[in-house]
Image (cartoon, helix red, strand yellow):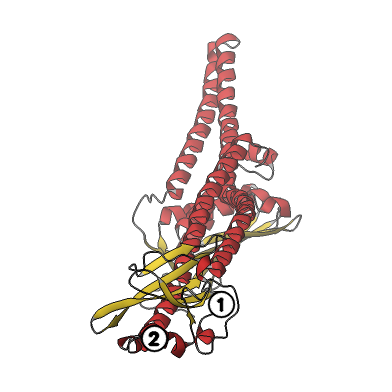
Amino acid sequence: MEQNQLFRRTRLRLASWYAVVMGCILGLSGLGVYHVVSITYQETIDDGLESVALALQKSIEPVLRSPNNFWQVAQQLSLKICHQEINCFSEDKVNYRQISEAVSSVNYYLRLVDNQGQAQALAGLPLKRLAILGQNQRWQTLKETSGVRYRQISLPLNARNQIRGYLQLGRSLGDLDRHLIALKLTLLLGYPMAMIMIAWSSWWLAGKAMQPVYHSYQQMEQFTGDAAHEFRTPIAAMASTIEAALKLYPEQEIPKFLATLKRQNNRLAQLTRDLLFLTRIEQHQSDGKLQPCCLNDLISDLVEELAFIAVETKVKLLAIMAREEPLYVKGNEEQLYRLVCNLIVNAIQATPSAGEVRIILNQFESSALIKVQDTGIGIAIEQQERIFDRFYRVDRDRSRQTGGSGLGLAIAQAIAHAHKGNIHVQSQLGRGSTFTVRLPLLLLNNQRSI
């Protein structure tokens, strides 16, 4: 297949399209995974922030009802107080007792903001690293000067039906960003490797998919060449005969040449009929309705009709019925007749004088077995796989003498397959061949399977 430029280009085109489609699907899948992971991680962070913020809101609002409320909240929660006298933007460490367990000075921060947007108390991240913006907005994503992003939730603090300030709780998104960067790098680095594997597998799969097509193409080429060769021989014979009749021979010799033309014409007609019959069989076009056929009677009739051929070639022809009761199959009787006839004729032609041909009818489970055994020349192992191909002949010289076209076994196999059966051969050079046809039995009311 690699030597054929047409199939090589087709395989490359098929593999390329497959790789492009799979690459697009893989890219979209990667984007989807990235988006889902990002959204899921952020929703988890938001849920955690909201649950902690609501718990703190419930603890702080009762304290805000008394005077100096922010002082009391800060003292109760051990927050850092912001006054003009105290630098609440200091980077000094503060010993938080309760809040420090829930709020990390690195990843989390807590701020109490009044209505004017001034910080009154804080814990965790120093204020100078993150400005106070839009405390009226419930959710915000802020970024500090170093580029680290923070997710913040703002909840109003109500006291006596008045908003006294806002609780702002935030969390660093640095771990989320690091994980997303790692995921992005993994997807970006894995994509080329995946595309290499996809390209290789596309090429391999395209080759696998095209093997049956290439095999059919080879059979078509062989069939075309063999058919042209088979048609060329009788046509050339007729042409030369006509030329000789017209130029070289007197009129009284013309009938001999006309007889030759008739034989060659009959050969062409038979070859054409065989090809059309084989085509109809392979396309499942039956010439008639299927009906019960008795294989015992069919084989007996064939042995009787072909006995004269066996006598002429000095071959002993025997029919052996291994079972006493008749065996029936459902099928086309004419086609089954031709199937067995082709096998018997081939066996007789392949068997030398004083040889023997046996036709054995037997039953195995729910199938009928027809064996055609001969003591002929046999078939080489390397040729046994091709003998059912159209126009293939083991001994071309003998086939020319007998007028065979190489379609007999191909027709036999097609008929067997059309009747849901099969045919196979066992042969050894110099010891003969055995062709076995297996057909499904038709069990009548008075019969049973054994």
Amino acid type indicated by mark 2: Ala
Observer able to see residue 98: yes
Residue located 53% across and 17% down the image: 254
- Residue picked out by circle 2: 55
Q: Callout 1: 10 Å neighbours few (<14), some, many (20+)?
A: some
Q: Callout 2: 10 Å neighbours few (<14), some, many (20+)?
A: few
Where residue 261 sits: x, y (%)? 53, 25
Please give left or right for residue 57 compared with residue 361 in the image: left
Quarter holding the N terminus?
top right
Disc 2 or disc 1, which is closer to the eye? Answer: 1
Q: Which residue lies furthest to the left in this view?
A: 161
Please give left or right for residue 304 compared with residue 386 in the image: left
2 and 1 marks in contact (CB < 8 Å):
no
Residue located 40% across and 70% down the image: 118
Q: In which quarter of the image is residue 224?
A: top right
Q: In this view, does 276 lie above or below 84?
A: above
Q: What element carries label 2?
A: helix
Q: In this view, does 122 lie above or below 289?
A: below
Q: In this view, does 86 lie above or below 180?
A: below
Q: Is residue 23 above or below residue 251?
A: below
- Residue picked out by circle 1: 105
Residue located 49% across and 41% down the image: 274
The foreground one among 180 and 175 is 175
Where residue 338 sits: x, y (%)? 49, 51
The foreground one among 171 and 345 is 171
Give the mark nearest the N terminus, 2 or 1: 2
Q: Quadrant of residue 155?
A: bottom left
Observer able to see residue 360: no
Marks 2 and 1, Cα distance to the nearest angstrom?
Answer: 19 Å
Residue located 59% across and 18% down the image: 240
Amino acid type indicated by mark 1: Ser
User: Which disc, if any, is residue 390?
Assistant: none
